[in-house]
Amino acid sequence: MSLRLVPVTFAQAGEFITDWHRHHRPPRGHKFSLGIAQDDVLVGVAVVGRPVARMLDDGHTLEVTRVAVADTARNGCSMLYGAAWRAAKALGYRRLVTYTQQGESGASLRAAGWRVVATRPPTPGWSRAARPRSDHGVDHIARLRWQPPR
């Protein structure tokens, strides 16, 4: 079964992420979303938005904030990462980043030609005394920042 890129709305991507992502909820917004289908059935999505890190939000950088793929979509993550970079470049962006958590292999990113460009220490979480937030199970985990070749 071959995979093909398909357009998806932000709402469709969010629903798919809710059903398939291992540890994150859908993001709050996006610049664009991509999908992959197998026999006209949506089997994967990628959501690309502004960088979460303020220092990277320079107007020329985007971040792949979520990728979720059904178990049946072999190589689907790599296909989505490659397509996200091609789309971002076509829109005039100069840089695209994403993150993996410590313990994740990054095999899909390496297969798409991406490389590790930074190691990020565990975060203390989003909650602060002035603005309490609930923990979503992904705080306190080190991450790797990835970037595709320019």
Image (cartoon, helix red, strand yellow):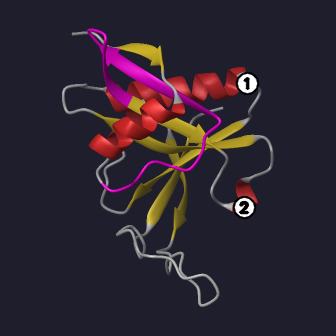
Extreme residue in the bottom direction = 129
Give residue 60's quadrant in the image: top right
**Quadrant, the N terminus:** top left
Please give the residue where the numbered disc 1 appears in the rendered image.
91
Q: Amino acid at mark 1?
A: Leu
Q: Are there few (<14), some (14-19), or many (20+) residues within 10 Å of tag 2?
A: few
Please give the residue where the numbered disc 2 appears in the rendered image.
54
**Quadrant, the C terminus:** top right
Above or below, 66 against 4 in this view is below
* Closer to the camera in the image, 125 or 41: 41
Q: Amino acid at mark 2?
A: Arg
Image side of residue 83 versus residue 4, left or right: right
> Residue 44 at what x, y percent from top left?
35, 29
Please check the rendered image and state whether residue 140 is part of the magenta-colored stretch, yes or no: no
> In this rendering, does residue 113 appear at all?
no
> In this rendering, does residue 45 appear at all?
yes
Q: Which residues are magenta?
A: 23-44
Above or below, 140 against 52 in this view is below
Above or below, 52 against 61 in this view is below
Among numbered discs 1 and 2, the one appearing first in the sequence: 2
Label 1: which secondary element: loop
Q: Are there few (<14), some (14-19), or many (20+) residues within 10 Å of tag 1?
A: few
Residue at 61% across, 82% down: 131
Residue at 77% across, 27% down: 92
> Residue 78 at what x, y percent from top left?
39, 29
Label 2: which secondary element: helix
> Residue 2 at what x, y percent from top left?
27, 10
Residue 136, label in figure: none
